């Protein structure tokens, strides 16, 4: 019973953290991009009257959600009402449950009991992530098809082709990491990155697999259907793509799904390539200096430092994806497909073969 409550609590904690971070990213994308591009951005709604500055928090985190969730739930004539309603949930729910296998810390010791800071400790965590992310494509396809709109249907077709195309190089990039660390367990991969190369350099995945990191980053952004890979919802061509005929809370679920995918990409990049919750030279008993000596730290403080390190890394890569969105122009559709099949796929295959050869020669 205690184990069940711990698992339930960690799962709930992860889901709430992701949902709140999704709201924060909405603010960064609207007001943060305005600051980056020297625009005013969201500044109309306010609670305390005119202030010398307006951060747009009321606009993005209060006014916009209220507006979305109180809009009329419109279903166009001729649409499949059941699938039209289910599509946003089918696209969002698998993404939310993906986080239960992403570790955000090592262990928390309470009353002599070690609690692994991972909601579900699966020894095939990477396969679980790929399976859940793959399921979200059904929400895109069903949303476009069930809307009875040619532009929405075309957006759904584009979305399915794009997501399937980039899942292949994304999976191959992960194979390089699996070969390097010899495990499909995300927690074990994170723990393995606590080693040091030559006593100084953290043995993070980026050191062993720099090419896999670049492939995973590009494929992950394409998988989330965000600029410069937002062809399924290209406003200049398809109005709003696969969610053209959606409004209110259903549209909000599709929008939230894009942010959740960005958080998944950031979480996996952190876990696989940048040490996860690892802090260089920090072990369970404290800091181990490379020149010798140890600074003992309480177990709770070590855990807080690890969770804080994981959080900061995830926030950085979320920010990086948003900066890429507001910096690069949209690809043409033929360029998008060519990048996936003609560049990333061969490069990912070559990386897997080279990694396997190096491991074979040096073991």
Image: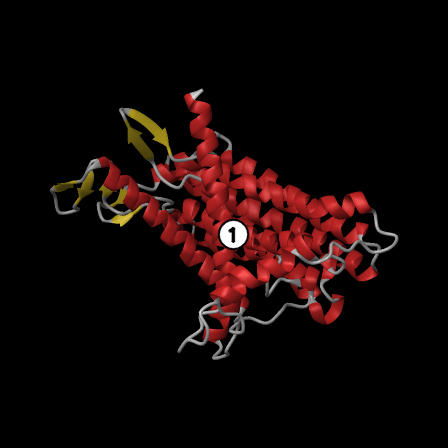
Locate residue 247 relative to residue 190 in the image: left or right.
right
Locate residue 335 relative to residue 289 in the image: left or right.
right
Q: Which of 241 and 327 is in front in this view?
A: 241
Question: Where does the image place residue 322, in percent across and percent down from the top left?
Answer: 50, 63
Q: In this view, does 135 lie above or below 234?
A: above
Locate residue 243 relative to residue 7 in the image: left or right.
right
Asked whether the viewer can see residue 249, the reply is yes
Q: In this view, does 140 lie above or below 322?
A: above
**Quarter of the image where the C terminus is located:** top left
Q: In this view, does 55 lie above or below 276?
A: below
Asked whether the viewer can see residue 345, the reply is no
- Quadrant assignment, res 113: top left
- For the rendered model, the colour scheme is secondary structure
Question: Where does the image place residue 245, in percent across and percent down from the top left?
Answer: 76, 58
**Quarter of the image where the N terminus is located:** top left
Question: Where does the image place residue 229, in percent across and percent down from the top left?
Answer: 62, 62
Q: Measuring 32% from the left and 27% from the top, which residue is drawn there?
A: 114
Locate residue 60 relative to residue 197 in the image: left or right.
right
Q: Is mark 1 on a helix, strand or loop?
A: helix
Q: Measuring 41% from the left and 58% from the top, which residue is drawn there?
A: 316
Q: Residue furthest left?
A: 293
Q: How crowded is mark 1: few (under 14 residues within 10 Å), some or many (20 or more)?
A: many
Q: Nearer the viewer, residue 338 or 362?
A: 338
Q: Nearer the viewer, residue 154 or 213?
A: 154
Question: Where does the image place residue 129, in percent across and percent down from the top left?
Answer: 55, 40
Q: Measuring 23% from the left and 49% from the top, which residue is drawn there?
A: 200
| Residue annotated with mark 1 | 216
Q: How many marks?
A: 1
Q: Measuring 24% from the left and 43% from the top, which residue is drawn there?
A: 282
């Amino acid at each position: 019973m205690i184990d069940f409550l711990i698992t339930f609590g960690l799962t709930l904690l992860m889901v709430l953290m992701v949902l709140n971070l999704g709201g924060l990213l909405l603010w960064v994308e609207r007001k943060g991009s305005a600051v980056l591009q020297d625009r005013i951005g969201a500044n109309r709604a306010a609670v305390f009257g005119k202030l010398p500055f307006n951060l747009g928090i009321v606009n993005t985190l209060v006014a916009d959600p209220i507006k979305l969730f109180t809009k009329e739930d419109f279903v166009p004539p001729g649409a499949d009402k059941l699938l039209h309603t289910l599509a946003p949930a089918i696209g969002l729910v698998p993404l939310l449950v993906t986080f239960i296998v992403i570790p955000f810390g090592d262990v928390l010791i309470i009353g002599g009991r070690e609690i692994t800071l991972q909601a579900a400790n699966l020894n095939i965590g990477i396969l679980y992530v790929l399976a859940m992310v793959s399921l979200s494509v059904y929400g895109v396809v069903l949303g476009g098809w069930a809307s009875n709109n040619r532009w929405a249907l075309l957006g759904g077709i584009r979305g399915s082709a794009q997501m399937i195309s980039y899942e292949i190089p994304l999976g191959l990039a992960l194979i390089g990491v699996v070969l390097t660390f010899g495990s499909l367990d995300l927690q074990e991969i994170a723990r393995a990155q606590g080693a040091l190369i030559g006593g100084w350099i953290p043995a993070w995945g980026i050191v062993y697999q720099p090419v896999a990191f670049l492939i995973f980053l590009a494929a992950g952004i394409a998988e989330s259907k965000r600029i410069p890979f937002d062809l399924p919802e290209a406003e200049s061509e398809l109005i709003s793509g696969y969610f053209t005929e959606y409004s209110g809370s259903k549209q909000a679920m599709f929008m939230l799904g894009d942010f959740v995918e960005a958080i998944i990409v950031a979480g996996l990049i952190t876990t696989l390539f940048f040490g996860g919750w690892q802090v260089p030279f920090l072990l369970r008993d404290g800091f181990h200096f490379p020149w010798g000596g140890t600074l003992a730290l309480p177990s709770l403080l070590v855990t807080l430092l690890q969770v804080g390190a994981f959080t900061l890394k995830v926030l950085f890569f979320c920010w990086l994806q948003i900066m890429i969105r507001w910096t690069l122009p949209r690809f043409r559709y033929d360029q998008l497909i060519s990048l996936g099949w003609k560049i990333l796929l061969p490069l990912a295959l070559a990386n897997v073969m080279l990694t396997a050869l190096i491991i074979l020669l040096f073991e």
